Image (cartoon, grey):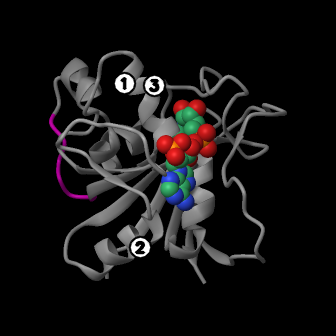
Amino acid sequence: MRELVYYVAVSVDGFIADVDGGFDAFMVEGDHESVVLQEYADALPAHAHAALGTEPPGTRFDTVVMGWNTLRPALDVGIASPYPHLHQVVASRGGRTVDPTLALVRDPVACVRELKAGDGLDVWLCGGGQLAGALLPEIDRLVLKRHPVVLGAGIPLFGGVTAGAARFTPTRLRPFESGVVVEEYARR
Ligand SMILES: NC(=O)c1ccc[n+]([C@@H]2O[C@H](COP(=O)([O-])OP(=O)(O)OC[C@H]3O[C@@H](n4cnc5c(N)ncnc54)[C@H](OP(=O)(O)O)[C@@H]3O)[C@@H](O)[C@H]2O)c1
């Protein structure tokens, strides 16, 4: 079955970005790069592939879902379509415009249910925290790149969740020499 996978970098204390929305505290280089560059190369933006001289493999994800605040930094630097190799879905409650190749949706939960009912590779939930909170009931798998840093404050992994616990089972935990631990969980 097609799954919704929240694949994201996170601090020890559960923040995906600092208070300014940046993530300079997260290490790019290190042996955990094998996960980023090989297993999850479909989740690299086109400009990263261009810089690396690589191509997205098209084996892990064919769709990305992101909140408006996650797309915005790309727009701010003139990138209208960061993942052109994926079907790109952007959640917004309205009043935004995006490149015509991106799908703008007001109801990301309904959209994700429809995507999961269809055929294809898994759907990558890119973030951010607000959208992940709204989509929590639909998340099948978590792949957390846990960086060895405490941010103390910032954008939480899940924003605005008020309902009860969502239970997951750890399926794989991989500590890397860099200090990053890649944690994988499946919904129980
Ligand atoms: N560490 C990582 O790997 C990683 C990954 C992704 C993002 N990030 C960071 O996370 C930050 C953004 O996260 P965030 O929590 O602030 O925002 P976000 O979830 O990316 O975007 C929030 C916006 O998405 C739309 N939205 C969210 N939930 C919705 C719903 N249920 N229905 C309709 N629209 C909905 C709304 O857009 P409108 O305002 O248009 O209505 C809302 O203001 C950025 O700093 C980004 O760099 C980090």
| Residue 85 x/y as whole percent | 17, 44
Q: Is mark 3 within 8 Å of ligand 1?
A: yes
Residue 59 in the magenta stretch? The answer is yes
Give the total of numbered labels.
Answer: 3
Three-letter amino acid code at disc 2? Ala
Per the rendered image, the range of residues in magenta is 55-61
**Residue furthest right in the image:** 152
Which residue corresponds to mark 2?
110
Q: Are marks 3 and 1 in contact (CB under 8 Å)?
A: yes
Q: Position of residue 47 (x, y in %)?
A: 25, 24
**How far apart, in angstroms, are the residues tagged by discs 3 and 1?**
5 Å
Q: Quarter of the image for the N terminus: give it.
A: bottom left
Q: Is ligand 1 within 8 Å of the beta carbon of the residue shown at mark 2? A: no
Q: Name the disc covering residue 75, or none.
A: 1
Q: Nearer the viewer, residue 85 or 32?
A: 85
Q: Which residue does the image show at 60% across and 24% down from the upper left?
A: 22
- Secondary structure of residue under mark 1: helix
Quickly name the residue at label 3. 73
Q: Nearer the viewer, residue 137 or 173?
A: 137
